[in-house]
Image: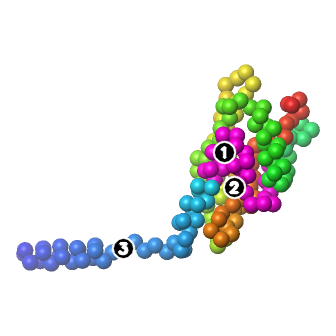
Amino acid sequence: MRRARDLVLLTGLALTLSCRIEDHTPAGSRRDDAAIRALLVGYYRCLSDGVLSACRDRFWPGAVVGALALRDSASVVEAVPMDSALERTSRWLDRLSPEFSVEMTRLELRQAGDLASAWVSVRRRLPKAGEKSEEQEGVEQFVLRRIGTEWRIAYGTTDLPLAPGPGRH
């Protein structure tokens, strides 16, 4: 009886030691995921801090942003060069109190070679004139490109306004 129990225990131990979780993750993709996550976290941090020149460093030259633009009492999505978007965003942020903040709450990444897509759930705190700040949640999308070992944003979308609406100057 004891021999049978010992045999079962040794067999179980041998099976346990021989089992391992196989990792079929493509080489480098975990490193890439971490680099992309750090890039986007840094982007939202510098946007919250109002340091837009640091935000610009996270985009490739020639990057485009699809963003909400307020035109004639209507909202339209407009694709603009990143530098133009940052200039407009800077004017918009200048009108807000320091209470403005935006943070990444969830990130969904898909990578294929040197390209990646990121869907980012964000929570924003937008100050209202003479009122308590309003919290909003939204989803932004990015297309990122890797050249060498460096990831940067090539395209992004946001629903933050880029231009003042009527009567808001």
| In the image, residue 41 above or below residue 10 | above
Mark closest to the chain's N terminus, 2 or 3: 3
Residue pointed to by mark 2 = 58
* Rendered residue at 66%/50% (across/down): 43
Query: Which label sits on residue 20?
Result: 3
Q: Amino acid at mark 1?
A: Cys
Q: Is residue 62 visible?
A: yes
Q: Nearer the viewer, mark 1 or mark 3?
A: 1
Mark closest to the chain's N terminus, 2 or 1: 1
Residue 10: say if magenta. no
| In the image, residue 7 above or below residue 36 | below
Residue 60: say if magenta. yes
Residue 24 located left or right of residue 121: left
| In the image, residue 26 above or below residue 136 | below
On the rendered image, what quadrant is the C terminus found in? top right
Query: Which label sits on residue 159?
Result: none
The answer to which quarter of the image holds residue 103 is top right
Query: Which label sits on residue 46?
Result: 1
